[in-house]
Amino acid sequence: KMAAPRRGVVVTLLATGLILAAGRSPTRAANPGISSRLFRAPLRALNVRLGSLKRISTKTVFWDGIPDKKSHKIGTTAGRNPIHIEHVEPNSPNANKTKLFGSEDELKALLKPITPINDVPDSQLGSVALVGAGPGDPNLLTLAALNLLETADVVICDRLVSNEIRKLVKGELKVAQKYPGCADYAQMEIYRWIAQGLRDGQRVVRLKIGDPFIFGRGGEEVLEIERLTSGRITPTVVPGVSSVFAAPLLGGAPLTHRGFANNVVIGTGYGKNKSTPSIVPYQEQTTNVYLMAIGRIRQLSKALKENGYPENLPVVIIEKASCSDQRVILADLNDAADLVEMYKVKPPATIVVGESARALFPSETYAHGVVGYEAMPITSHYELDQTRMTNTIGPR
């Protein structure tokens, strides 16, 4: 009797492969070899789970990464990905800037420009790197990012960086107080922390959720660091896995799909000084991805329809991508805002608009609402927390 074919992916580990090459430390640039420690340490530090990892030969492993969904009952917690990201309501007491940063006089002083560090010789200045932390799961960090986190003297991170990634920091950790209504004050505090680290000759890592250059003020921080050091320090920048790409993928929403979409537009819900960004006019076969827009989804939906977007255009919302409480909500422009309120969706959340977003969720099979775990058309590199899936909507 022939055995049924096994599901999985065959991965061949090459000595010169990209994964190993990406793990080279910048400090070892002169060394043409790659230390095996750089490959083993990230696996130990991140506790990587690749399904049932079975060795086939000395160079080939079998990744049985697709779980048997029938064995996972809704309501259990077995196999969940225990990654958590903090979120805060806009009316939270934590949003009180005087509580976070001090009196009104202290707030005014915080916003004053920082004097450039001209009194410290080049040889005594520290270094700074802008590092992308990805969407939350430490397994999605790059090896370059991990190496910098482990060797930094001080790490300044966004509050939305997961606790699991923060635990990888070996040096001092400072968490930016970027709560709603406090972003400008928190940003100036970050600059002051960076300036102090450079003055003290420290290796500073500025750890940013997602990718530093996609709605992360990365470019602004590069310019400020160059101003602070009068051009003597050029920051290192390490890419991160942006939620623009990771969240739709983990939510089963392709950004491009032949016959559905061959263009991608990236947008945000908030412009400078809390302004509302302009809307790109509707184009067929285009997918729009919005970050930091879940709090303005009603205004966003209205603006899209006013710019020619069909009312029944599919919308897929991915809340807390890659984390234990990730949720995927199916909607269209007519009911997206109502469903966000109904299910109390919180940031970080990614909004995907366009026909391609529901290529794997055909309307004749899937109803609007939260997609149950067992109904997902894909399996991620982790298994989602089952405990929040008890009142979800699956296939019709």
Image: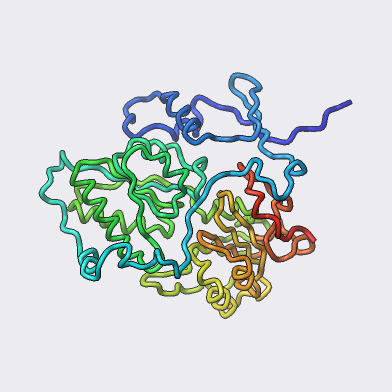
> Which image quarter: residue 315?
bottom right
* Of the pair 390 and 240, the residue shown nearer to us: 390
> Which image quarter: residue 81?
top right
Extreme residue toward the left, this view: 119
Q: Is residue 238 left or right of residue 84?
A: left
Q: Position of residue 346 (x, y in %)?
A: 54, 63
Q: Position of residue 77 (x, y in %)?
A: 65, 45
Q: Residue at x 50, y 73 (%)?
A: 279
Q: Quadrant of the N terminus?
A: top right
Q: Quadrant of the C terminus?
A: bottom right
* Of the pair 50 and 221, the residue shown nearer to us: 50
Q: Residue at x 39, y 66 (%)?
A: 95
- Compared with residue 364, is residue 149 higher up or lower down, i.e. above or below? above
- Compared with residue 122, is residue 249 higher up or lower down, i.e. above or below? below
Extreme residue toward the top, this view: 58
Q: Is residue 272 left or right of residue 253?
A: left
Q: Position of residue 178 (x, y in %)?
A: 38, 60
Q: Position of residue 37 (x, y in %)?
A: 43, 25
- Compared with residue 387, is residue 152 higher up or lower down, i.e. above or below? above
Extreme residue toward the right, this view: 1
Q: Residue at x 49, y 34 (%)?
A: 18
